[in-house]
Amino acid sequence: TVLVLDFGAQYAQVIARRLRELHAYSEIVPGDAPAEEILARRPSALVLSGGPASVYAEGAPGMDPAVLEAGLPVLGICYGQQLLADALGGEVARTDAAEFGRTSLTVDDPGGRLLGEQPLAQIVWMSHRDTVVSPPPGCRVLASTAASPVAAFEDPERGIFGVQYHPEVSHTPWGLEVLKAFLDVAGVRRTWTSHSVIAAAVGAVREQVGDAQVVCGLSGGVDSAVAAALVHEAVGSQLTCLFVDHGLLRQDEAEQVEQAFGAHSDTRLVSIKAADRFLRQLEGVSEPEEKRRRIGEEFIRTFEEAALEHASGAAFLVQGTLYPDVVESGHGSSATIKTHHNVGGLPERMNFDLVEPLRWLFKDEVRRVGAELGLPEEIVERQPFPGPGLAVRIIGEVTREKLEVLRAADAIFRHELARAGLEGEIWQAFVVLPDVRTVGVQGDERTYGYPVILRAVTSEDAMTADFARIDYDVLERVTGRIVNEVPSVGRVAYDVTSKPPGTIEWE
Ligand code: XMP
């Protein structure tokens, strides 16, 4: 395991993902964790992440000095590099010239291990104010930029490496090579593949559930599908899949999910029509977290009843929780932006133990595991769809009437995107129905209908996202069809907010 010590960087997860792309298993731990805790996990190398702070700032996140004394290979990135330099006797200074974004880097010493195989002039991605002005004694300086005299340093003998720039982001073209060189020098074994992931997850599930019965809620999204496939691989016919139609699905979704799973799997699948009970729970509720809470609770009650009826009272529930959720809830300091569970928030009391076979995986790894397990592309490449469904896309109270309006508009939008061949490049595309009315004119008559908002984003992992640059002609076609075919909609807007500061969903 390579441990990424997180000093408050948005990028810590990206570092871990890149290392895994290089087949080195990596996990994230808080940067200030005690040395015993870090060493007890027997890491083969450490990466110190970037962070928003200055090493000299009051309350700047630091690390237990005993971690460095253990002699493990260490790569410091950005703030991590400064922390490393500071801890080992180098010097960090606040220069006036901060560097943000694309920056030209010169490799001054091509004889080193970290950058030895790389072009002498290259582009890197920077984001810093402080900079290392002299490396720790015994380290050689490898590269510099206009504002960073020590943009990279190393002492391979002691296993010490630092870079001021961000090798983990795709805007640093040679970045992956930096990480690879570090893993090579550190002698990290690179055996992390979807194959080994499956073997480990299957073993863990068997151990956890023994010969007990298990239920899995399928949402139609990729996470629950892959989780179910893994559990099926592990315990076969002990698994019963439950597909709850909570009345908050997209047009024709129930049929599509039933078909896709029915055709491709010998897992037992029970479909439950539960729209009435979910919609009753949502009556008069407009606060987003309260909606999520009620939907989450209703899911569990539905599962409990179904487990009694169809799965001999199964006591295990499979959830498609992913590693980013685990990291986020594990770090006490990060704020709850929204309650993200596959079902939208779990009640405190429930009759299930959770089985979470994906809790060590990132989304792209989940897709690869799904493909390896033989799930068809239509499932593996499906867009994510939130467990609470259309309820978080109707701002304010959810009613049957609004659900119908939203479903119709949403189907047109997605259909036109598919027709324009844009599905592949879009992470998620959907329509939002706000809780307001708008004046318009149609056929010489005043109208007073709903506006709808189109949302389409590109993303690698839903942590960050950008709005999709959809052609105006496509948007025009979508708008024309929506206002003509969905009578109560009189206006269409396109959301051009990235994440951050927006989130992907509106609630
Ligand atoms: P946000 O809106 O936070 O969404 O940018 C990030 C990703 O998570 C999905 N999402 C959810 N998925 N239960 C889920 O299973 C939820 O409550 C939930 N809320 C958001 C969202 O669709 C996007 O892919």
Image: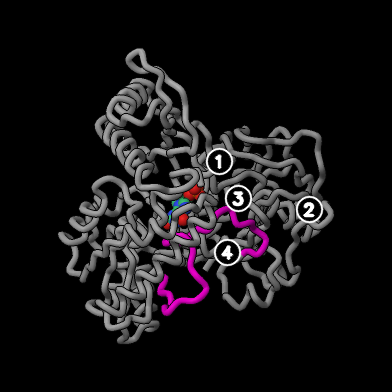
Residue sticking out furthest to the left: 263
Q: State if disc 2 and disc 4 touch (CB < 8 Å).
A: no
Image spot of residue 368 (x, y percent): 33, 57
Residue for badge 1 = 502
Dot 3 falls on a residue whose secondary structure is loop
Q: Which amino acid type is marked by label 1?
A: Gly
- Magenta highlight range: 331-356
- Which residue is identified by label 4? 329
Tag 2's secondary structure? Answer: loop
Asked whether, in this view, residue 108 is left or right of residue 184, the answer is right
The spot of residue 345 in percent (x, y) is 49, 63
Three-letter code, disc 3: Gln
Residue at the spot of label 3: 10
Left or right: 215 with respect to 67? Answer: left
Disc 4 marks which amino acid? Ser
Contact (CB < 8 A) between labels 4 and 1?
no
Mark 3 or mark 1, whichever is nearer to me: 1
Taking the image as shown, residue 464 lies to the left or right of residue 208, namely: right
Q: Residue at x 52, y 64 (%)?
A: 326
